[in-house]
Amino acid sequence: MNPWCVVRSHAHAEAKACNHLQRQGFAVYYPKFLRRRSHARKVDWIPSPLFPRYLFVQIDFEKSRWLSIYSTIGVANLICFGDRPQSLPGEIVAEL
């Protein structure tokens, strides 16, 4: 199984980055929750990111063109350790 890496998006551009990464063929996990919003005596529930500005992408370093993530619309950068993206254990993403 390919490792999961963390992508940092531009402010309020998580959904845009998620769509463009999926269009490039990457598996993306963008966790959301329902947040209560009150405005003008009206209460509604809207989906909000669990981790604002962060999403997870599964990368196959041998086969995919993962450097294209840096130039994807909505993506600010990858969380890296050295010159390679830092990978997360699959259990962490599975628990979310």
Image: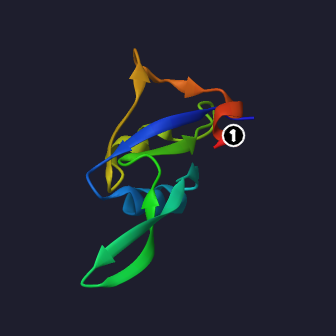
Q: Is residue 26 visible?
A: no
Secondary element under disc 1, as helix, strand or loop, is helix
Residue located at (43% from left, 46% from top): 51
Point out the image quarter for the N terminus.
Answer: top right
Question: How many residues crowd around disc 1 within 10 Å: few (fewer than 14), some, or many (20 or more)?
Answer: few
Residue under label 1: 95
Does 31 sit left or right of 82 as displayed?
Answer: right
Does 42 sit left or right of 45 as displayed?
Answer: left
Q: Position of residue 29 (x, y in %)?
A: 57, 51
Q: Position of residue 77 (x, y in %)?
A: 33, 38
Residue extending farthest to the top is 82
Residue extending farthest to the right is 1
Does 75 sit left or right of 59 as displayed?
Answer: left
Residue located at (54% from left, 44% from top): 57
Residue extending farthest to the front is 41
Residue located at (35% from left, 41% from top): 70
- Give whichever of 37, 94 is nearer the camera: 37
Report which quarter residue 17 is drawn in: bottom left
- Is 42 placed above or below 27 here? below
Question: Label 1 is placed on what type of residue?
Answer: Glu
Report which quarter residue 90 is drawn in: top right
Q: Is residue 16 visible?
A: yes
Residue located at (32% from left, 75% from top): 38
Point out the image quarter for the C terminus.
Answer: top right
Q: Position of residue 2 (x, y in %)?
A: 68, 35
Does 23 sit left or right of 70 as displayed?
Answer: right
- Give whichever of 79, 70 is nearer the camera: 79
- Is 21 placed above or below 86 here? below
